[in-house]
Structures are given as C-alpha cells and as structure tokens.
C-alpha cells in the first residue's frame, strides 16, 4: 500500500512538472513581449545581450556538468555509502561552483575592457563600461542560478518535480514584475536586477526544504581533498568543451550582428531566435521526456539494436512536429512577430529586422530538433569527446557563413547561416554515430517521414487557398494580425492533423498515448 502511494505521488509530481514546464515557457514568451514593449530592439538591449553572453554560457555549461558529472556521483555515494557522504559531496560542489563563479566574474571584470570592447566593436554608441557594469550584476545572479541548478537536479534525482517548477515560476514572475514596474525609472537595469533578484529568491525557495542538510556541511572547506569531487571535475571537462562550442555560435552571431547598419540588430536577432526556440521547445520537450530515459537505458545495457530503434522513434516523433511548425513560422512570420512584439518601443524597423531573422531561423527547427536527440545519445553513451571535432567545424563554418551571408542578405543571412550549420552538424553527427556505435539512421528507417512531408505540402496548399478565400469574404477584419495568426494556426493545425490521420501517421497515437501520469 505504501509503495502504491509513493508511485501515485511520483506520477502526480511528473504530471505537475509537464504542465509546469509548458506554463513556464508561456511565461517566458510573455516576458519577451514585455521586453519588446519597454525596450524594443535598441542599443541598450544590444548592450545587455552582449553583457549576458558569459553569464548565460556559464549557466548552460554548468547544467551539462551537473547532469553528466555531479548527479551520477551524488546518487552513487548515496547508494554505496550513506547520507552524510553524499550530502557532504553536495555542499562541497556548491562551494566549488560559488568560488569558481566569483573567480570568473573577477577575471572578466579585469579583462572586461578588452573582451567586451572586442565583442561590441560593431555597436554604434555602445559603452563598454556600461556593459561591464551589467555583466557584474548578472554574474552575481549567476552564482545563485548555478546553485539553483545543482539543487534542482538533486530534486529531480529524488523524483521531486514540484519544487523546481515552482522555483522557476518565482524567478520568471519576479523578472516580469521588474520589467513592467521599474523600466521607466532605471531602464535596462530593470532587466538586470530582475534576473538577479529572481535567482536569489529562487535559491531561497529551493534551499529552504533542505536546510536540515546544512549539518553535513562541516567539512565543506576540505573539498580539495575529495577524490569524488576531483573525479567529477575531471569527467566534466568534455561537457564543458561541448557547451563551449555549442554556445560559441551564439557569440559569433551577436558579434557579426553588431556590425549591422541599424541600431538594435542584435536585439532583433535575439527576439527571432528566442521565439523560434521557445515555440519549438514546447513540442520538443515531451519527446525528450519520453525517449531520453529509454535512450539512457539502452546505452547502459549496451543494446545497440534497442538504441537504434528508440532513436529512430524519437527522430520520427520530433519531425512530426518540427516540419509543419517550420512551415507555419515561414508562412506566418509577420503575424508571429506582430502579435508577440509589435507594440510600445518596438518600432517598424525592429519589426522588419525580426521577421527577416525569424524566416532564417524557421528553416533550422527540424535540424535543431534532430541534433538535440543525437547529442543526448552521445551523452548517454558517455562519448562526449568525439563531439568536439564536428562542433569545432560548425563554429568555423558558422563564422565565415555569417560574414558572407550577412553582407548579402543582412540579418536574414545570419539566421539562415545557423540553419545551414545545423544541417551540416546533423550530417556529421549521423556519420559519427555510425562510425562510433554502428548505428545507422536513414530516411527510409523513419516510417512517418514521407507521410509527414506529404501532409505538410498539402497543408501549405490548402492553407493558402483557404486563407486567400477567407480574406476576400471577410475583408478588412483579416487585417488584424492577432486574428490572422489565430486563423493561420487553427487552419494549418486542423488541416495537418486531418491529412496526417488520412495518411495513417502513427506518431500522434503512440506519442500522445504516452504523455500521461504513468509514463514508463
């Protein structure tokens, strides 16, 4: 009876986590809309995005370190030793992360004039001192954000999904409050202090339930003697390098965009990237939740056949969503940008730049989704080092493509370069997977791919015909961007669903049937 109650509570927590993550992404879209309203695509927001490069990278790289290095060791110590040993290891990691964050902040403050002047050399009128000041406050926030990452992953490892979701809600709500409440008084610093305050309060919330574990922190300052910590840091090096090369593309894009003719080019690029990323993640997350545990299990069992089948199902599932979503963003990019951003300080120039960038990023969605699944396979196998070569190649390719395509097509060129690089990376990762594991993923192995492409093509044709006919019948009311977007999303979604059912696409039944509390 007790086990049944525990299983019920675990399933309930997982369900809450799913809904919470979706709600969180909706809130981040609202946050983007408020940013557009109060700051538009401006020089001060460009400066903020440059200042946020290092803190954001630091947070992303730490997530890989925690998931790939800290959590497995924490669980191992908890299982093989005792609670004291595992939680002592936890607090030692917290201390090391904090000290390292402070060291990074000090180094970049010292090197700031050189580093940030290089990154912002294309900005017209940008102040390096202002960027360094914002960076300092953001790095303070990152100290708390990194602590939050460790605590969240510990909660996840113990099947407690409720607290991490609420913690993220606290952070994003505080950020929105600062943007809406203080932007008139302190300008862009409302965004800076919103991040800082949000991370602090999230830390306070997450750490409160484990305050009794402070008793295990007595040997926290002897971390340098801990073999477990040394092994974790050593094993984390490939994860750090992988994160570096994955994030360098973003740095390159922002650096090149800084040389644009118009103020706010970096901001517009960020709005388009964030919108495409968040919309795709809403559909990508359920696939990862379902298939990643299976990928890990197959990798641990060294069952290549099972790993091949699971990866094939996962790629088949993400393409079912990403191909039509990519087309929808291309067709309705004007409406998406207008509805989410075109108000307040977001002017016509910002609107034009953002919709052009969104067009380039729209082509990226299928390749980005497949690469996300492929990289998870390498993580699950512990084969992270082989990723470095294709990632280095993608960074170099992206740099030169950015320069060439930006000079020809403007901001669209930078975004489209990302799509080309992601496609090239996908080809290289598939080759690497075949050579390293003997797993061969081909288009003919994806049972729904042809059906999805046919359904998408029919969706495009019927949607255009229906939309043009509706404009003639309804008239001026279709000039409203919100109404046009709702109409396009509804008609494309309905047509695609009906056609995919007609072609007997299996993904919806198999995927939606598993998104329930008792996911296995």
Image (cartoon, helix red, strand yellow):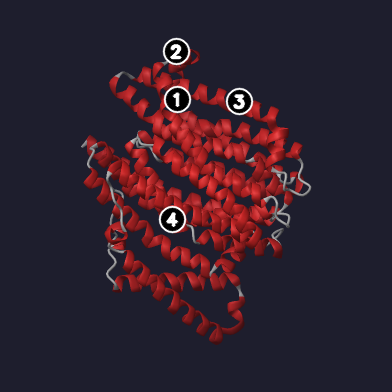
> Quadrant location of residue 460?
bottom left
SS class, disc 1: helix
| Residue contact at pointers 1 and 4, CB within 8 angstroms | no
Side of 114 where 223 appears, left or right = left
> Mark 3 = which residue?
102
> Mark 1 = which residue?
233
How many numbered markers are drawn? 4
Q: Is residue 360 visible?
A: yes
Q: Is residue 151 visible?
A: no
Q: Which numbered disc, 3 or 4, marks the residue that appears first in the sequence?
A: 3
Q: Nearer the viewer, mark 3 or mark 1?
A: 1
Residue at horizontal 45%, vertical 39%? 388
> Mark 2 = which residue?
225
* Quadrant housing the N terminus: top left
Which sits in the foreground, 174 or 344?
344
Residue at horizontal 23%, vertical 38%? 302
> Mark 4 = which residue?
367
10 Å crowding of disc 3: few (<14), some (14-19), many (20+): some
> Quadrant location of residue 114?
top right
SS class, disc 2: helix
Q: Which numbered disc, 2 or 3, marks the residue that appears first in the sequence?
A: 3
Q: Nearer the viewer, mark 1 or mark 2?
A: 1
- Measured from the top left, where is residue 472 in percent x and y? 55, 86
């Amino acid at each position: 009876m007790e086990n049944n109650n525990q299983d019920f509570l675990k399933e309930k927590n997982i369900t809450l986590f799913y809904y919470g993550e979706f709600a969180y992404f909706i809130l981040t879209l609202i946050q983007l809309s408020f940013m557009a309203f109060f700051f538009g695509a401006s020089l001060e927001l460009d400066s903020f995005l440059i200042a946020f490069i290092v803190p954001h990278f630091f947070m992303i790289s730490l997530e890989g370190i925690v998931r790939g290095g800290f959590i497995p060791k924490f669980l191992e110590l908890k299982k093989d030793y005792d609670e004291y040993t595992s939680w002592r290891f936890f607090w030692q990691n917290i201390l090391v992360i904090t000290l390292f964050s402070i060291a990074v902040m000090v180094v970049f403050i010292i090197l700031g004039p050189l580093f940030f002047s290089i990154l912002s050399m294309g900005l017209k009128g940008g102040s390096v001192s202002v960027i360094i000041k914002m960076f300092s406050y953001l790095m303070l926030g990152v100290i708390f954000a990194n602590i939050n990452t460790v605590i969240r992953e510990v909660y996840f490892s113990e099947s407690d999904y409720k607290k991490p979701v609420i913690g993220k809600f606290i952070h994003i709500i505080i950020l929105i409050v600062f943007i809406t409440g203080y932007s008139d008084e302190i300008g862009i610093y409302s965004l800076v202090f919103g991040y800082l305050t949000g991370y602090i309060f999230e830390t306070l919330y997450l750490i409160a339930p484990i305050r009794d574990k402070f008793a295990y922190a007595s040997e926290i300052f002897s971390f340098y003697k801990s073999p477990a910590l040394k092994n974790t840091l050593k094993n984390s090096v490939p994860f750090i390098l992988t994160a570096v090369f994955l994030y360098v593309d973003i740095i390159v894009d922002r650096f090149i965009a800084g040389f644009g003719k118009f103020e706010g080019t970096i901001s517009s690029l960020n709005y388009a990237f964030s919108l495409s990323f968040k919309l795709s993640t809403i559909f990508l997350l359920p696939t990862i939740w379902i298939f990643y545990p299976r990928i890990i299990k197959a990798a641990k069992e060294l069952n290549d056949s099972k790993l091949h089948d699971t990866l094939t199902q996962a790629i088949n599932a993400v393409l079912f969503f990403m191909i039509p979503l990519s087309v929808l963003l291309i067709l309705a990019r004007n409406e998406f940008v207008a509805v989410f951003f075109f108000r307040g300080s977001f002017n016509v120039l910002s609107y034009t730049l953002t919709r052009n960038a969104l067009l380039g990023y729209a082509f990226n969605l299928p390749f980005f989704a497949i690469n996300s699944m492929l990289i998870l396979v390498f993580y699950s196998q512990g084969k992270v080092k082989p990723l470095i070569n294709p990632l280095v190649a993608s960074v170099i390719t992206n740099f030169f493509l950015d320069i060439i395509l930006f000079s020809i097509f403007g901001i669209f060129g930078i975004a489209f370069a990302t799509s080309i690089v992601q496609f090239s990376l996908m080809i290289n990762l598939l080759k690497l997977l075949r050579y390293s594991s003997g797993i061969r993923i081909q288009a003919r192995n994806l049972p729904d791919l042809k059906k999805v492409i046919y359904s998408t093509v029919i969706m495009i044709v019927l949607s255009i015909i229906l939309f043009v006919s509706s404009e003639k019948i309804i008239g001026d009311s279709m000039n409203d961007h919100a109404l046009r977007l709702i109409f396009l999303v509804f008609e494309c979604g309905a047509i695609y669903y009906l056609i995919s059912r007609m072609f007997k696409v299996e993904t919806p039944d198999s995927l939606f049937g598993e998104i329930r509390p008792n996911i296995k």
